[in-house]
């Protein structure tokens, strides 16, 4: 009973980003504070720790039965951290990733099902969509209670916001409680997929789709079209968009006159250099931005330029190298061969399609956690 309450709290607060940020020296790149490098203790992290602690004995038992792969994983974590461009950064990122991985393990050990999470997931999703609509109408943040759920203060005059143009007028794209509307779109895409798979009420799917539509995320809408509407073969989609992602640094004819494209293309060349220099082990988890600062000319060392490359496979390869990427592929492949779940392949296709144009599945906690939650329920 106690564990069920904690799980429902976790699911409800999943889309929030209330946290305590720290700014040690390693949270800077080229002397500039970078949000992605700031060690952060989130409210959801505390709930995860309490929830995990309730299954401590089951976790120990599972580790004893899977000692060899666990040791291999820990050795890789040690080596990746030790040889990282920023070891303290890597240590923090690995600690967070291990916490989330153990959470996924506990969900599987407890055999959590859709009925266990549907109600709090629906409630929190309706709340963030409501906030998204209000932000879009007001063209500003709401504040108040929503500030404590992680809403960031903004108005039409705030620089660096994601915008969209209608009939010559620029509108701010609403991020709700997320750091960017694209991150919100990825989250809602996975939520919609879950409600779609489990054939939930039409009104619930329509509201979630409305929230997805209002993010104006091209990548998420493309994933919706291919995976949900057209029911395209997920294996083909995974291969096609993975190859497309890896080919991006070598394509010189990308139209950079479009702003949102040029912002992404800018980082492809230094990303290619980073990967070629550390192809086997990578630059360490969370090490992309510190490494990027060493590959950019001084005139480009600006806070808006110091961000992860908008390409999930390339970001993964740069931080964990071919060895780490190979381990992930083997785990996914073995799980698929064992279970033959097309639902998981479709979920993976959504991640690969959106990940070909963004990085939030690897860098932002809300997206990582909804992905792990969905995977645990669908398996």
Image (cartoon, grey):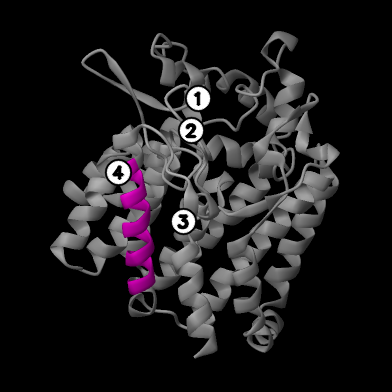
The reply, left or right, for residue 34 in relation to residue 341 is right
Residue under label 1: 158
* Cα distance between the residues tagged 3 and 1: 23 Å
Place of residue 276 in the rendered image (x, y in percent of width and height, measured from the top left):
68, 27
Q: SS for tag 1?
A: loop
Dot placed on the residue nearer the N-terminal end, 2 or 4:
4
C-beta proximity under 8 Å, tags 2 and 4: no
Residue 332 is situated, as x and y percent measured from the top left of the image, at 49, 60
Q: How far apart are marks 4 and 3 (CA)?
A: 16 Å
**Magenta highlight on residue 311:** no
Q: Mark 3 points at which residue?
A: 15
Q: In which quarter of the image is the C terminus?
A: bottom left
User: Visible in this render: residue 277?
Assistant: no
The secondary structure type at the circle numbered 3 is loop
Disc 4: which residue: 133
Give the residue displayed 40% in from the left and 72% down from the top: 377
Upstream in sequence: badge 1 or badge 4: 4
Residue 140 image-quadrant placement: top left
Query: Which tag, 3 or 2, sits closer to the chain's start?
Result: 3
Q: How far apart are marks 3 and 2 (CA)?
A: 19 Å
| Crowd tier of the residue under label 2, counting other residues whose Cα lies within 10 Å: few below 14, some 14–19, many 20 or above | some
**Which span of residues is magenta-colored?**
119-134
Name the residue that disc number 2 marks: 154
Q: Residue at x 51, y 41 (%)?
A: 179
Query: Relative to the observer, which residue lies in front, 324 or 371?
Result: 371
Q: Which residue is drawn at 54% across and 54% down?
A: 148
Determine the secondary structure under disc 2: loop
Sequence-first tag of 3 and 1: 3
Residue contact between numbered discs 3 and 1, judged by CB atoms under 8 Å: no
């Amino acid at each position: 009973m106690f564990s069920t309450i904690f799980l429902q709290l976790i699911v409800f607060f999943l889309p929030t980003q209330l946290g305590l940020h720290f700014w040690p020296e390693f949270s800077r790149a080229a002397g500039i504070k970078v949000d992605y490098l700031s060690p952060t203790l989130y409210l959801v992290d505390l709930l995860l720790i309490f929830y995990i602690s309730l299954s401590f004995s089951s976790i120990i038992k599972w580790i004893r039965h899977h000692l060899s792969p666990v040791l291999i994983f820990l050795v890789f974590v040690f080596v990746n951290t030790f040889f990282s461009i920023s070891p303290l950064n890597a240590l923090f990122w690995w600690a967070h990733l291990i916490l989330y991985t153990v959470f996924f393990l506990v969900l599987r050990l407890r055999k959590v099902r859709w009925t266990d999470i549907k109600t709090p997931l629906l409630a929190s999703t309706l709340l963030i969509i409501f906030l998204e609509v209000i932000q879009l109408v007001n063209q500003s943040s709401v504040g108040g209670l929503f500030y404590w759920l992680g809403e960031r203060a903004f108005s039409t005059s705030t620089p660096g916001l994601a915008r969209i143009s209608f009939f010559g007028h620029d509108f701010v794209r609403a991020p709700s409680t997320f750091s960017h509307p694209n991150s919100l779109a990825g989250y809602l895409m996975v939520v919609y997929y879950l409600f779609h798979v489990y054939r939930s009420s039409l009104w619930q799917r329509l509201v979630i789709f409305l929230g997805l539509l209002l993010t104006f995320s091209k990548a998420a809408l493309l994933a919706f079209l291919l995976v949900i509407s057209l029911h395209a073969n997920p294996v083909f989609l995974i291969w096609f968009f993975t190859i497309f992602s890896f080919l991006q640094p070598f394509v010189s004819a990308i139209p950079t006159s479009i702003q949102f494209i040029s912002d992404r293309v800018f980082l492809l060349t230094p990303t290619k250099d980073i990967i070629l220099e550390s192809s086997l082990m990578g630059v360490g988890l969370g090490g992309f931005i510190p490494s990027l600062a060493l590959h950019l000319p001084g005139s480009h060392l600006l806070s808006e330029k110091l961000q992860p490359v908008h390409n999930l496979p390339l970001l993964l390869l740069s931080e964990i190298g071919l060895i780490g990427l190979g381990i992930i592929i083997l785990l996914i492949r073995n799980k698929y061969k064992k279970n033959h779940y097309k639902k998981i392949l479709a979920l993976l296709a959504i991640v690969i399609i959106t990940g070909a144009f963004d990085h939030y599945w690897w860098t932002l906690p809300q997206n990582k956690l909804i992905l792990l939650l969905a995977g645990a329920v669908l398996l």
